[in-house]
Image (cartoon, grey):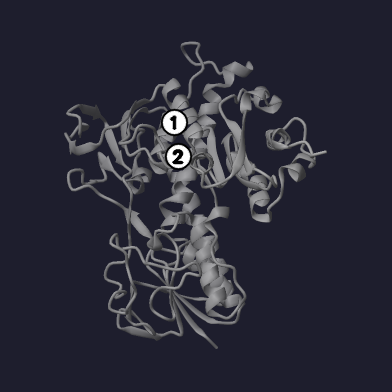
Amino acid sequence: MTKVVIIGGGPGGYEAALVAAQLGADVTVVDRDGIGGACVLTDCVPSKTLIATSVRSTYVRESARLGIEIPTADGRPDVTVDLRTVNERVKRLAQAQSDDTAARVLKEGVEVIPGEARLVDPSIVAVGDQRIRADVVLVATGAHPRELPSARPDGERILTWRHLYDLTELPERLIVVGSGVTGAEFANAYQGLGSEVTLVSSRERVMPTQDADAAEVLEGVFRRLGMTVLGKTRAESVTNTGSGVVVTLSDGRTVEGSHCLMTVGMIPNTANLGLEEAGVRLDKGGFVQVDRVSRTSTPGVYAAGDCTGVNMLASVAAMQGRIAMWHALGEAVSPLKLSTVASTVFTHPELASVGATEEDVRSGRVDARVVNLPLDTNPRAKMTNSKDGFVKLICRQQTGIIMGGVIVGPRASELILGVSVAVQQRLTVDEIAHTFSVYPSLSGSVTEAARSLMQASPE
């Protein structure tokens, strides 16, 4: 029986453990935070739970447009958020998800050892004084929020997102530093909950790694709803004044608020694990270097998830972990293919994308056709007063094979699955165009976009 030791119980670790157990290995997971890891306990699950509450709050605030009146003492519809109750629910659901995942792992016969592990050598893992011999080791230790020396989080006024769920009162004036996916999500979420939000962006537009049209739509929504977006400037320092914060910007300006949320990247949890001593190669940022089947530079040692820096998504971590076990245990396996990974920015509206981008087309890297269908033409969107967004499809110039897509709108995280299936299975726009969609539905815009990309057959 092959002995597998997995360091870390997040998506990369526990999904790998389930696969290894299914294939008959003797599996031990060494975990220091709780099964589910930071993803379940402090990052993805809590943040999306908070965002769900924010979206509901926004729907209530905008209900008057649909003829629903919620009177208050002054006769105007309003919403009050009890952040203590919100965060209690957030943490309760996160713990419940962790407990459910742990129960599943234990049911499959996986041994879970609480503690911190390190490699003594490629085949021996130490947990305190205990030594565990392993045929296969998977490193899935995740990452933690990056901190600036001039803006050290204190958990009171200067925060990382892992501090947010201990707040008992809604930040009156929240300054969010960093306009990537995490910064945009939290800025939008707290705006929906009722905070006055300022977003500091070092780039010309928010979410610079996302589709430009999508980022433009979302920044427009942010500004229209009252968010202050400060572009092309960096936070040089953040000071806790006792009653608030002062953020000093690189252009000399200062911004005052009640709290500051720092979202300036991630640092891999790879220190003090004995990796380099075991021959595991790290890059200059400390991320474990892996190939497309999750192998490190040391035979028998694999790595998965955020500690590898490969597209920091829970879904990618889980797939890396599964692929590692399939490969290590002799199963047929396809290498990780990032061109088929779907991702979502959980703003309101949501932004979801998969595959090739319009920038790929414009740069000449991909020979393709693009269509962008505004959501405000969709009847279902009109019914729900959801006019911000679009459906964008990208297909090969000659064959019509769908190579990618972007959706901005309500539940884009769900709608993108159809485009993901098309990209994964190499479906053509003709095949999507001839597929029935419900009328009226938001998904109808996907088939309509496909029809727009159809070309007449040559005579």
Corner quadrant of residue 31: bottom left
Q: Which residue is mark 1?
A: 193
Callout 1: helix, strand or loop? helix
Amino acid bearing label 1 = Leu
In this rendered view, identify the residue nearer to me: 320 or 111: 320
Which numbered dot is residue 391? none
Callout 2: helix, strand or loop? helix
Q: Which residue is mark 2?
A: 86
Residue 115 visible in rendering:
yes
**Above-or-below relation of 350 to 128:** above
Q: Residue at x 38, y 67 (%)?
A: 289
Residue 329 in the image, given as x and y percentages of width and height? 56, 80
Residue 82 visible in rendering:
no
Amino acid bearing label 2 = Val
**Above-or-below relation of 109 to 265:** below
Q: Residue at x 80, y 41 (%)?
A: 434
In this rendered view, identify the residue nearer to me: 450 or 117: 450
Residue 401 in the image, given as x and y percentages of width and height? 68, 48
- Looking at marks 2 and 1 on the same chain, the residue that comes earlier in the sequence is marked by 2
Q: Residue at x 45, y 55 (%)?
A: 311
Corner quadrant of residue 56: top right
